[in-house]
Amino acid sequence: MNFTEIANNRQSCRNYDMNRGVEQEKLNSVLESARLSPSACNGQPYHITVCKGEYAKKVASAVTGMGMNKFAANGTRYACYFRKALCGFRRFGRKGKKQ
């Protein structure tokens, strides 16, 4: 399947079953795909944290608190994506490295 087929056939699920968790093998597969995804100059300026249990409830509260993403309130696990600040070396190569 090529990317266009995947994009045309995708769907967004917004009706979560609180009694049905995400299988660990599926979660591991998604995280491994994210780990292998390319980044500019291999800088990998991100960090992904998976939250479940009480932490997941706090994340749900944070993402639904402004009236947006109400569908996320029923999730059982959340993958939180954090972007790291770029350092000069990553941004400018050797020219950005301190002498």
Image (cartoon, rainbow, N blue to C red):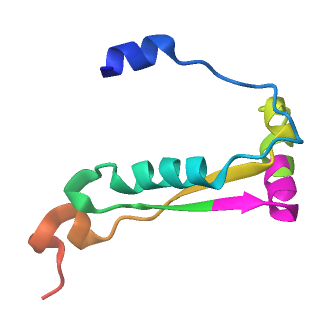
Locate residue 89 relative to residue 53 in the image: left or right.
left
Residue 6 position, x and y percent, is 42, 19
Q: How many marks?
A: 0
Locate residue 40 relative to residue 64 in the image: left or right.
left
Task: Say which of 80 and 4 sits in front.
Answer: 4
Quarter holding residue 18: top right
Quarter holding residue 93: bottom left
* Residue at the (81%, 48%) spot, across then down: 76
Q: Check if residue 58 falls in the magenta segment.
A: yes
Which image quarter is the C terminus in? bottom left
Which image quarter is the N terminus in? top left
Residue 22 position, x and y percent, is 70, 46
* Residue at the (76%, 25%) spot, across then down: 14
Residue 2 position, x and y percent, is 30, 20
Q: Check if residue 27 falls in the magenta segment.
A: no
Give the overall secondary structure of the magenta segment: helix
Q: Which residues are magenta?
A: 50-60
Task: Say which of 89 and 19 sits in front.
Answer: 19
Residue 42 position, x and y percent, is 24, 60
In the rendered image of this protein, does residue 6 appear above or below residue 36?
above
* Residue at the (29%, 62%) spot, across then down: 43
* Residue at the (81%, 25%) spot, across then down: 15
